[in-house]
């Protein structure tokens, strides 16, 4: 068995004295692991850092074996990432989420989003919105996508102000009634038609509170794991503070 693909390095762990088991998010083969012989060498160690883009050739005798990777660096971003605390927190959070995806299940959209974010991870203005869209797409890929297009009660696509914390569906201001204080805020830029740019900080913080609720309930909780501190640390660099996480 053999295939070739482009991937983003998510992480790895030492295996034996010189090798590394590397985890990639690939364009066509999803999250995939493989053994890299000599992965701890001076030549390969910089290539196998989280966030880097690589060309990978995977080989195995039988399809369900872990197999081995031959890796070639395409975009070595780790040095730039290490120069910024915010970028480092963002990469740790995004790669940590990607490592929760089902193994070997194609995720071309998430791979493209992650690769683009890793390439521009120092872009302070663009990255928060990209990260938010990645979290929403990640939830959808796991079957927990939010329905923000119309009101769960009336079916209307106008005057949407809230999201049900139980169903993940939008709720209009009129339909919320006395239950408004129990609902999550739907920021203007996530409503049909969007909102004015740039996104106000309070709307961005509300959006991250929204995704945090469903990540905690549907992803971290069932796995009995805690959210990575990297997300909270990254939001703190934006001035969103712990409340957004």
Image: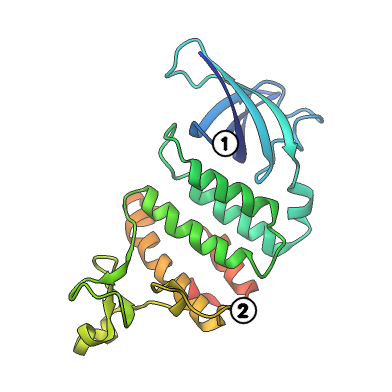
Percent x, y of residue 138: 43, 52
Q: Residue at x 24, y 67 (%)?
A: 166
Q: Residue at x 46, y 18 (%)?
A: 65
Check disc 2 and report the residue beneath it: 239
Q: Is 47 above or below relative to 213?
A: above
Q: Is 11 above or below relative to 20?
A: below
Q: Residues within 10 Å of mark 2 (few under 14, many from 20)?
A: few
Q: Residue 89, labelled with which disc?
A: none
Check disc 1 and report the residue beneath it: 24
Determine the secondary structure under disc 1: strand
Q: CA distance from mark 1 to mark 2?
A: 31 Å
Q: Residues within 10 Å of mark 1 (few under 14, many from 20)?
A: many
Furthest-top residue in this view: 61
Percent x, y of residue 48: 69, 36
Q: Residue at x 44, y 79 (%)?
A: 188
Dividing the picture into quarters, in which one does residue 100 lie?
A: top left
């Amino acid at each position: 068995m053999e295939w070739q693909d482009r991937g983003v390095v998510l992480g790895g762990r030492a295996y034996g004295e010189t090798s590394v088991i590397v985890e990639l998010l690939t364009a066509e083969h999803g999250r995939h692991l493989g053994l890299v012989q000599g992965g701890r060498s001076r030549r390969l160690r910089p290539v196998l850092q989280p966030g880097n883009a690589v060309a990978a050739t995977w080989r195995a005798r039988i399809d369900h074996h872990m197999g081995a990777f031959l890796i070639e660096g395409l975009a070595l971003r780790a040095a730039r990432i290490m120069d910024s605390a915010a970028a480092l927190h963002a990469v740790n959070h995004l790669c940590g989420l990607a490592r929760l995806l089902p193994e070997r299940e194609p995720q071309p959209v998430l791979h493209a989003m992650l690769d683009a974010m890793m390439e521009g991870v120092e872009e302070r203005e663009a990255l928060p919105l990209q990260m938010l869209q990645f979290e929403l797409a990640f939830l959808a890929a796991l079957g927990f996508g939010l329905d923000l297009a119309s009101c769960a009660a009336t079916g209307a696509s106008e005057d949407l102000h809230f999201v049900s914390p139980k169903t993940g569906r939008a709720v209009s201001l009129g339909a919320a009634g006395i239950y408004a204080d129990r609902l999550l805020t739907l920021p203007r830029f996530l409503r049909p038609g969007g909102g004015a740019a740039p996104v106000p900080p309070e709307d961005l913080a509300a959006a991250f509170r929204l995704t945090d609720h469903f990540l905690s309930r549907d992803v971290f909780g069932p796995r009995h794991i805690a959210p990575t501190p990297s997300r909270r640390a990254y939001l703190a660099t934006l001035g969103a503070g712990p409340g957004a996480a």
